[in-house]
């Protein structure tokens, strides 16, 4: 199963917005609204940030937002903060009855 | 508070078997699908397997299909992963994860499986 395609790294300054892309296909991201995003700090357990493309779980800051257009999903973090520095993974359900993750994006807050 | 506690990891030789267990508490276990997700050292997340709350639907990643078997006991609030014919590339931290519409909202702390001779 090939992974969804994410940039290996992105960076931004505190207070600036950043966007992480997640490219899939018409069999996964383009076909279903089951796209999620996870934040992973080093040595910590993954944390769900966005589910079903654009929904935030309770307790997740409104600075995090999700969007999808065609076969590509995106996560935007507005007003970057130091604690946002982490790895971010997207995931999508796939028509083969599997779930696929992206390769992960390392976010650096400058 | 939702709690997921994995156990059963350890060191095993290639070709060997292990059975992972996950004990859930703090929610109505029989209402949720459950998953196993793994992360190899220095690598990204990889979904492994899924089972619906009613045990009717099971999915596996291509990399483990035919070797791993997911099961659950709703009365005990537990989910299991039987891993056979283990390979070096199965070395990873294995997480028990609660699913909601293919979003994974609660994760255990993970159990390390090391496959090595």
Image (cartoon, coloured by chain):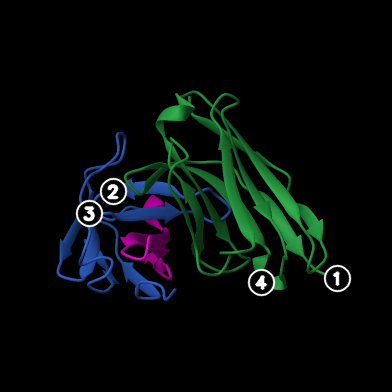
Chain colours: A blue, B green
Residue A82 visible in the displayed image: no
CA separation in Å, label 1 and label 3: 43 Å
CA separation in Å, label 4 and label 1: 13 Å
The 10 Å Cα crowd at callout 4, few under 14, some 14 to 19, many 20 or more, is few
Q: Give the residue at x 33% y 59%.
A: A93
Q: Which mark is residue B89?
A: 4
Looking at the image, residue A26 lies above or below residue B18:
below
Mark in front: 3 vs 4: 4
Residue B61 visible in the displayed image: yes
Q: Which mark is residue B117?
A: 1
The magenta segment is A82-110
Depth check, front residue: A48 or A84: A48
CA separation in Å, label 4 and label 2: 29 Å
- Which residue is disc 2 drawn over? A51
Mark in front: 1 vs 3: 1
Chain ID of residue with mark 3: A
- Which residue is disc 3 drawn over? A53
Chain ID of residue with mark 1: B
Q: Are marks 2 and 3 in contact (CB under 8 Å)?
A: yes
Q: Are marks 4 and 2 in contact (CB under 8 Å)?
A: no
Chain ID of residue with mark 4: B
The 10 Å Cα crowd at callout 2, few under 14, some 14 to 19, many 20 or more, is many
CA separation in Å, label 3 and label 4: 31 Å
Q: Are marks 3 and 4 in contact (CB under 8 Å)?
A: no
The residue at the far right in this view is B117
């Amino acid at each position: 199963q090939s992974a969804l395609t994410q940039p290996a790294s992105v960076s931004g300054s505190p207070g600036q917005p950043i966007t992480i892309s997640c490219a899939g296909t018409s069999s996964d991201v383009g076909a279903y609204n089951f796209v999620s995003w996870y934040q992973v700090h080093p040595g910590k357990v993954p944390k769900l940030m966005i589910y079903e493309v654009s929904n935030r779980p309770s307790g997740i800051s409104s600075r995090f937002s999700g969007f999808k257009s065609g076969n590509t999903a995106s996560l935007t973090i507005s007003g970057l903060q130091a604690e946002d520095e982490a790895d971010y993974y997207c995931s999508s359900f796939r028509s083969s009855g599997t779930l696929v993750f992206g390769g992960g994006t390392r976010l650096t807050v400058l | 508070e939702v709690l997921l506690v994995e156990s059963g990891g350890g060191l095993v030789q290639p070709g060997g078997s292990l059975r992972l267990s996950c004990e859930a508490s703090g929610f109505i276990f029989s209402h949720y699908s459950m998953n196993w997700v793994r992360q190899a050292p220095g690598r990204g997340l990889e979904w492994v397997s899924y089972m619906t709350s009613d045990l009717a639907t099971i999915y596996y990643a291509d990399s483990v299909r035919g070797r791993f078997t997911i099961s659950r006991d709703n009365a005990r609030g537990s989910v299991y992963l039987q891993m056979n014919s283990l390979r070096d590339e199965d070395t990873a931290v294995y997480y028990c994860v609660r699913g909601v519409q293919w979003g994974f909202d609660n994760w255990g702390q993970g159990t390390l499986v090391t496959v090595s001779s």
